[in-house]
Amino acid sequence: MRNISMISVRKIKDAILRGLTWLFAALTFTVLVFIIIHILTRGIPYIKPSLFALEYTPENVSLFPALLTTVMVVVLSLLIAVPLGVFSAVYLVEYARRGNRFVKLVRATAETLSGIPSIIYGLFGSLFFVTWLGWGYSLLAGSFTLSIMILPLIMRTTEESLKAVPDTYREGSFGLGAGRLRTVFRIVLPAAIPGILAGVILAIGRIVGETAALIYTLGSAAKMTTGLFSSGRTLSLHMYVLTSNALYEGQAYATAVVLLVVVIGINALSAFIARKVTKR
């Protein structure tokens, strides 16, 4: 009888936990759907061809320069942060001795950097890149600031992905006579690519939605970004500037629609690449 009662209590607890999980999942999904519907209903009526003009004017409030600047910032930030983050994680997992104090210090530093507000990164970028290095409000200063901000995220996700690769993969490669470097680049990293891409997707989402750090480093010029030392604004900054002016509220929602489509497209492309790589 005692065993039967314990089994019944366990079943009740499992049912309660399962119900709470479904409840919170449904709430999350509902909030997401509500936000998307709200943005689409408010923004789609204001999507016009003039919104995609090559040059920004107060009349057309074009988001095309901001769209190109967003792509440039994403690409440049990833080019800086992804190699550093991936190779740092490879060293921590594959080469550094376990229990090493230096490894513990690096991990603690990465976790600390992950919790710093983005505006602090913006102030640092303003003092170091904009003022001390003399880059001014520029694409380069904003990209370097964002690369520092997303570096801990890429490091941690890559590290966890490398740890998830079974040790039998490494042992089999070593048993066939391959060295550590070949094992890492031909066996371990390909197996960890889906997890690494997941971290890159999260990093892209943070870059695209960032405003505070870019206000102090990239600036908010509405013109087309013509070089690494040229100022500009991303879509999120463009939307922030428009919402600060009550005359362009509809165009701000239209920018939010385009931003939503860009994020969904980037996520879909990354997931497609991850599936292709996994099949190979």
Image (cartoon, rainbow, N blue to C red):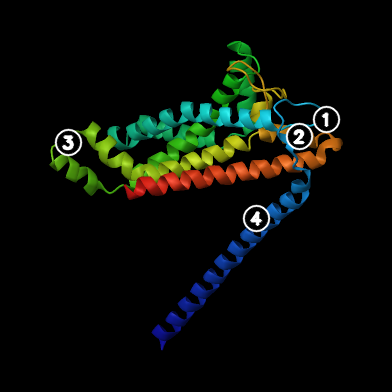
Disc sitting over residue 32 in the figure: 4
To which quarter of the image does residue 238 belong? top right
Tell me the element at label 1.
loop
Q: Residue at x 19, y 42 (%)?
A: 173
Give, as a three-letter code, the residue at label 4. Answer: Leu
For marks 4 and 3 on the same chain, the one whose residue lies earlier in the sequence = 4
Q: Quadrant of the N terminus?
A: bottom left
Give, as a three-letter code, the residue at label 2. Answer: Ser
Tell me the element at label 4.
helix
The spot of residue 200 in percent (x, y) is 48, 39
- Distance of label 1 from label 3 (alpha carbons): 64 Å
| Callouts 2 and 1 close, C-beta under 8 Å | yes
> Would you call the spot at circle 3 few (<14 residues within 10 Å), some (14-19), or many (20 or more)?
some
The residue tagged 3 is: 178
Q: Residue at x 59, y 43 (%)?
A: 263
Q: Residue furthest right?
A: 247
For marks 1 and 3 on the same chain, the one whose residue lies earlier in the sequence = 1
- Distance of label 3 from label 2 (alpha carbons): 59 Å
The residue tagged 1 is: 59
| Callouts 1 and 3 close, C-beta under 8 Å | no
| Callouts 4 and 1 close, C-beta under 8 Å | no
For marks 3 and 2 on the same chain, the one whose residue lies earlier in the sequence = 2
Which numbered disc, 2 or 1, marks the residue closer to the eye? 2
Q: Residue furthest front?
A: 49
Q: Is residue 163 left or right of residue 38?
A: left
Q: Does 178 appear above or below 30?
A: above
Camera-nearest residue between 227 and 107: 227
The spot of residue 100 in percent (x, y) is 32, 33
Tell me the element at label 2.
helix
The residue tagged 2 is: 50
Residue 190 seen in this snapshot = yes
- Distance of label 4 from label 1 (alpha carbons): 32 Å
